[in-house]
Each structure stands twice: as C-alpha cells, then as structure tokens.
Image (cartoon, rainbow, N blue to C red):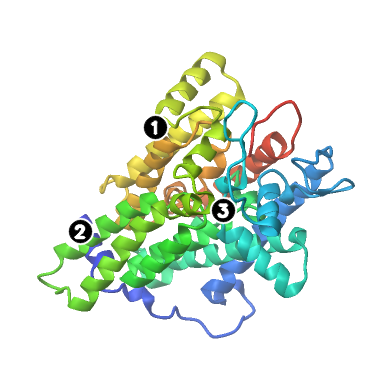
Amino acid sequence: MSETGRVAHTVGERPPSRTRLPGPPGLPGHPREWPLWAQVTALYLAIRVVSGVLLALAAQDQVWFPAVTGPAEGDIDLALSWDAKWYERIATEGYPDGLPVGDDGRVRQNPWAFYPLFPYAIRFVSWATTLEFATVAPLLALVAGLGAAILMARLVVETSPYDVGSRVGPALAVVAVWAAQPAAPVLQMAYTESFSMLLLVAFLLLLVRGSWVGCGLTALLLGLTRPIALPLSVVVLVAVWLRWRERETRPVGVGERLGIGVAVVATGISGIMWTTLAWAGTGQRDAYPTTMTAWRGEAAIDPIEPWRRTIEWAWEQRTPETVVPALSMVLALVLSLVLLVPRLAPGIDVRLRVWAVAYAVYLLAVVDGNTSIVRYLVPLFPVAAVLVGAHRMSLSRWWRWRTAFWVLAGFVGQVGWIWWLVVFEPPSDFPP
C-alpha cells in the first residue's frame, strides 16, 4: 500500500478494524482467545507487578527524608516520594492564594507548578471512600495507566495496515514495550503521567475516529493534567488539513465543520488554560512561568538554551547526570524524526507520527535537560512501534523477538532508573 493509500485509509473513512474483533464473549481458556481489553489488562498488570516488586525492593535502601520520601518513617513507599509530596499537599490543602517569596525576593517552589486534575481526583475519591492519599493516589494512577494501555492497543489496531487477524499481536507488543520502558514505574506512582497518558491516547483515538468534539473536550481535560497540550495543536491542524484534502470525495458538512472548529479552538485553549487559571488564582499574570523558574534556578525560561548547555556539559563532564538526559533527548528526537519520513514508517498512522515529532520538538524547546527527561519521554509511545518493527507495511517476522528484547531492556532500565533517581541519596538532587 502506498503512503497516499495509507493516508486515505486512516484519515478518510472509518477503518474497517472498528468492527468487533472475532472472539467469543467472556474469558475463554486460552489467553489468545480473550477480548483485546482482557489481553491488555493481563499483560499490563503483569508488567506493573514487576515494577512494583522493584519499587518495594528499592524502598529497603531508602533512608527517611520528610521532604522527599513517603508516607512516614518506618513505612517508606517510593510510589509516594518526590513530586507525590506536592500532589498530596494540593489534594489536602489546595493551592495558595499567592506565590511565596524568599528573602532574596524571588518566588520559591510552590504548588502552582503542578496541574490540578490528578490531585483533585484524589481528593474526591478520598472524600467518597474515606481512604487516605497513600492508598488512593497510587491506585488511581494504576487504573488510569491501565486505561491508557487498553486505549493504546485499540488505537494501534484501528490504525494498523495489517489484516484484521494479525493486528492484535503488534498492538500488544507496542503496549508491552511502552509499559516496560525505564521510567514506566511512574505509571503506578502518585504522579500525573498515568492521567495524562489516558487522556492523550483517548484524544488521538477520537481524532482517528473523526470525533472532533470529543477531541476538543478531551484536550481541555488534558490541559489540566500536564503541560503537553500545546503539541496536540499541531496534530489537530495536520488532521484538519488531511481531512480537507478529501473534501471532494467526502464533503465536509456543516456539523463536521463546527466539530472541527471546536477541536481546534479547544486544543488551543488547553495549551494556555493552566497559565490563565494560575493568573486568576494568584492575581499575578506570570504566576505559572515565574513558578517554573523557581525549579530552574534562573530568572527566565530561554527556549533551546538549556539543551545546548546540557549537551556541552555531557561532552565535557561525561557523568550519568549529564550524559543520560542529553542522549535520551537526542535519541528520542532522531527516532521521532524518522517516524515523520513516509517511506521509513508507513505502517504508523500519520497523526501518531506527527504527535511524536511535535512532542519531541516541544521538549527540546521548553524543558530543561535534567534527569527528569527520562520520565518526560513516556508519552512517546509511537516509538515503541519502531522498536518492535511494526512501522512498516509488512510486519517483520522477528517482531516477537524484538518485543521480548525491548521489554527485557526496559526492565533493566527500570532497575537503573529506580535505584539511581527514585531512591534519594543526599546531597544529590537528581529528580526522577
């Protein structure tokens, strides 16, 4: 199938894979006969069990530090450490009316750096169930991550160029590699990555199905979860352009035009929503960007400049703290750019490829080159399709071996990520 045919298949009429995959209801004896959602659930939870064991083992090496570890001395749980302490504060106390200022006149680190959907969802569930943060937060993260995995598999199936009967395997492979990547334990920690992944994959799935209004509403929720909504504007514009190219064969009706308008406007609003709400909540117009500079230790945010320094430091110092962020970003950007070349990755839907490139460039423009970049790469799930060999029109016969290799490599990476970054050993301050 040519690239033109591929675009017509994925952007035009609804893919034939939207029909229910063959298989009896319920859970037959052999896992291959299970419905797709059940297979994904078993696979994803099995991987999370491995990550959970690693976190529990690493917790034995963690010394109690009140500002970092949680929930209490003698009961250290790494799923409740680092940024989880901020989410707990927001869930229990909310956001301050103003920005705290130090003796030097500069804004200090404060809750306005963290988006509200995840901690307020925790607050609601805690209120409804009377359960504590330590129980609710990791559980919500786990459930949201599972939801993201199920939708991801469905997204891969519905955009796959392969025969209906051979689409499930590659979809499970993509989910497995994504769920086992080095920073994947964050998907069961009291962090917001699971919520953002659930909404991100839902957004892309709705976009593939042509549900423009649903895309817009999902984008608004995503704008309250993590600062990753701006790259989605690029994806929406590309999707609109591809749909407009088909207007002669598939006319764009008034209802669809209105839906497209909703998607474009809502996605644009989602990118600036939290900045606006922080302004309204504090009365300070630059409350959010000023708060973010408190983490950077600089007076302003200069695009690209942090990465230039990171690459220089990596070349000069050659320490893990400098080399890993630089190498991770370079590899992510290169792989994402490869996805954008039609001849190199025709088996991946064009909108997923655009997302990968837009997000990688966005990270390069606005994010510091620190150790957190490993965690920030979690949304780049289309890269998993390249790793397992599902990026071409014909599936490689080695895709199972490739999947096994990258899952195993991911587990090894998790060991390194947890013991290097999640376990806190002062005076180092290299966040996960």
- Distance from disc 3 to disc 1, alpha carbons, whole Å, reads 23 Å
Residue receiving disc 2: 241
Above-or-below relation of 253 to 271: below
Residue drawn at (70%, 27%), measured in percent from left and top? 428
Comparing marks 1 and 2, which lies closer to the viewer? Answer: 1
Tell me the SS state at disc 3.
helix
Q: Residue at x 47, y 37 (%)?
A: 367
Query: Mark 1: few, some, or many residues within 10 Å (few <14, many ≥20)?
Result: some
Please tell me which residue lies in front, 248 or 135: 135
Q: Report x, y in % for residue 115.
A: 55, 53
Instruction: Indicate left or right for 323 with 254 as reference.
Output: right
Question: Which quadrant of the view contains residue 337?
Answer: top left
User: What's the residue type where badge 3 is placed?
Assistant: Glu
347 or 153, which lies in front? 153
Q: Position of residue 106 (x, y in %)?
A: 57, 30
Residue linked to disc 3: 193
